[in-house]
Image: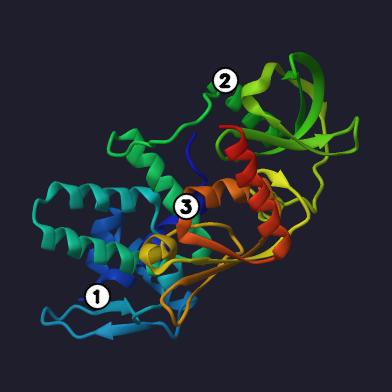
Amino acid sequence: MREPSRLRKAEEIIKLSMMFQSSFCGLCIDDIKEHFECSRRSAERMKTLLFELFPDKIEEVASSDKKKRWRFIKGTMNSLITFNADDFANLEYLKNLSNDENKQKQVDELISKIKALTPQKNARALETDIEAILESEGFAVRQYSRVKTDSKTLELLRIAMLSFKKVQFLYSKDESSKTITLNPYGIIIADKYYLVGYNDYVSNLRLYKIDKIKDLTLLDEYFEKDENFSLTEYCNNSFGIYQETPIDITLEFDKTVKDDVLNYHFHPTQKLKELENGNIQVKFTSGGTYAICQELFKWGTSVKIKKPNSFKAYYKQYLSDVLNNL
């Protein structure tokens, strides 16, 4: 089925706008006619419409061929120029084709400049998409221990969340199984995949390890998602997947691991500061003290807990329990 003519015309005007922005020498009527394979009359109409839409944003460019040429004033269409994950993945691919370290460095600088032009709200998603593309092309491998998750289960959950349909499954815990009916809200990816959703039976949110889910079925029953629920905010209250009352935590990392800390993501609320002694202070507000202890254990003697004292005591007990288990 062909697109409605109005939709095609709107798309052509947007393309012409981008051409007006990117052209240094400007476009003439013949350029528009050739690019869109249309009559001169149609090209004139497109140019006139653009002039009506952006009366103060178009400038005439001097030319030697006696043809009138126009372009947008620099920066006019910047907000419409976007970069997607494929763009960055292609740049990374081209960078890796070169054996010249200077060239690779220059491409890295170019990527950084382009990322700086990308809206902050899209930057995080782009990074994730780029990683996925590089993985699919065989240029990246995730090297960490994790539990295997059935792709069919994940796909069914995706369909359920998109269509706001309830799911039912058998959940294994403590050598027994229980039938769970759930309104699926989202998936948290940590050391394992966790399904978060509203359980009508307990009238509250619950987390379930997806690798423990068996016989998942999509019910022909719809649910209304709590409009106040935000998966991001839900995760911001915890470290990993452990939901507890958030506490204010202050850590101090030794200057010997300065670069690693400055390039590390501990928590969405984190604030990093370089101290006079060269050490790095990290502050964040989060629940999940057990998960935080596991994270700090990886940093060994390079980290100290400054605040609060209650968390210091918890960590000491955690380490004592580990030693007693040897």
Kindly indicate the quadrant of the structure image that contains residue 176.
top right
Tell me the residue that label 1 is attached to.
26
Which amino acid type corresponds to the residue marked 1 in the rendered image?
Gly
Alpha-carbon span between mark 2 and mark 3: 39 Å
Mark 2 vs 3: CB contact within 8 A: no
155 shown above or below 292: above
Alpha-carbon span between mark 1 and mark 2: 52 Å
Which secondary structure lies at badge 3? helix
Q: In this rendering, does residue 41 appear at all?
A: no
Q: Which numbered mark, 3 or 1, is in the foreground of this view? A: 3
Which secondary structure lies at badge 2? helix
Q: Earlier in the sequence, mark 2 or mark 3?
A: 2
Residue at the (40%, 40%) spot, across then down: 132
In front of the other: 292 or 210: 292
User: Residue 198 location, x and y as percent?
Assistant: 81, 37
Give the number of the disc on residue 300.
3
In front of the other: 98 or 289: 289
Q: How many other residues sit within 10 Å of disc 3, few (<14), some (14-19) or many (≥20)?
A: few
Q: How many other residues sit within 10 Å of disc 2, few (<14), some (14-19) or many (≥20)?
A: few
181 shown above or below 311: above
Q: In this rendering, does residue 244 appear at all?
A: yes
Residue at the (52%, 46%) spot, across then down: 4
Give the number of the disc on residue 152.
2
Q: Is residue 29 left or right of residue 260?
A: left
Q: Earlier in the sequence, mark 3 or mark 1?
A: 1
Name the quarter where the C terminus is drawn: top right
Q: How many other residues sit within 10 Å of disc 1, few (<14), some (14-19) or many (≥20)?
A: many
User: Residue 127 location, x and y as percent?
Assistant: 42, 52
Q: Earlier in the sequence, mark 1 or mark 2?
A: 1
Alpha-carbon span between mark 3 and mark 1: 61 Å
Which amino acid type corresponds to the residue marked 3 in the rendered image?
Gly
